[in-house]
Image: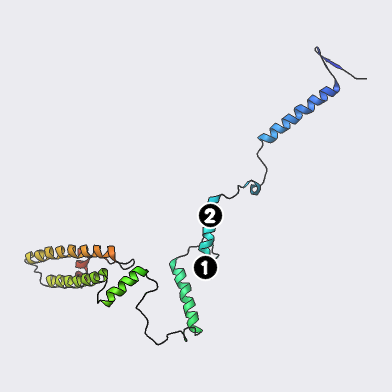
Amino acid sequence: MAVAFAAGRRLITPTRWARAFWSATWSADAAATASAPSSTSPDKTKKAPTGQHRLAAVIDAVNERKLPPELRGRGNAVRSETDIVNVVEQRIWHSMEEGHFENLPGKGKPLNLISNPHADPAEDTLYRILSRNGCAPEWVELNKEIRGMIAGWRSALRKAWANRSEDDGSNWNDDCRVLQEQIRHINDKVFRYNLIVPFGRQMFGLNWEKELDKLKLK
């Protein structure tokens, strides 16, 4: 026989009351779980690597393969050009000690310098044509001209410094104006030379104060 409880005008049976109680409890637990911080481990919530990260990993792997075996697997360690040079020198000395350079092809014969396999084919052809006609590239001729001008300028500076008079500095002042004008002309040629010369063969211009300091130290 069903038991009923009077609640105002509404009649509530035990079965309906229990259903309402458990429904309210489950809703409260679900709300608390949603508001609580997730206890999932960081490894499971880690995002998958993006396309950019995968590309960077591939580039790092390719660069790693380009290095000598002695320098691989060093992570983020600093790799300088000196490290690679040291590895190359160690390999050369090791090969020399084992006698790998004793029976090389062409040993004792002059090198064939007609062509340069490491140069650009167009430039190599141009240099061969110039060599056959007794000419040299413009930057080679300009280098010789600049070095000759610098040698003559320094000789004139030493002469003017030796002939200067402490009592009358007019001659020294006139020589300074001429020498400074010549130094500007030389530096203009150095600037042009540095624009056309292959990379790594650039030269420095003259500096008036440094040249005078050299003379004072002598």
- Report which residue position mark 2 lands on: 55
* Spot occupied by residue 197 in the image (x, y as percentages of width and height): 29, 66
Q: Nearer the viewer, residue 99 or 20?
A: 99
Q: Residue at x 87, y 17 (%)?
A: 4
Camera-near label (2 vs 1) is 2
For residue 71, the mark is 1
Q: Residue at x 17, y 63 (%)?
A: 185
**Label 2 or label 1, whichever comes before in sequence order:** 2
Q: Secondary structure at mark 2?
A: helix
Mark 1 residue crowding within 10 angstroms, few (<14) / some (14–19) / many (20+): some
Q: Amino acid at mark 2?
A: Leu
Asked which quadrant contains residue 110, the reply is bottom left
* Spot occupied by residue 204 in the image (x, y as percentages of width and height): 26, 65
Does residue 91 appear to the left or right of 165 in the view shown? right
Asked which quadrant contains residue 5, the reply is top right
Q: Residue at x 64, y 47 (%)?
A: 42
Q: Secondary structure at mark 1?
A: helix
* Spot occupied by residue 79 in the image (x, y as percentages of width and height): 47, 64
Asked which quadrant contains residue 201, the reply is bottom left
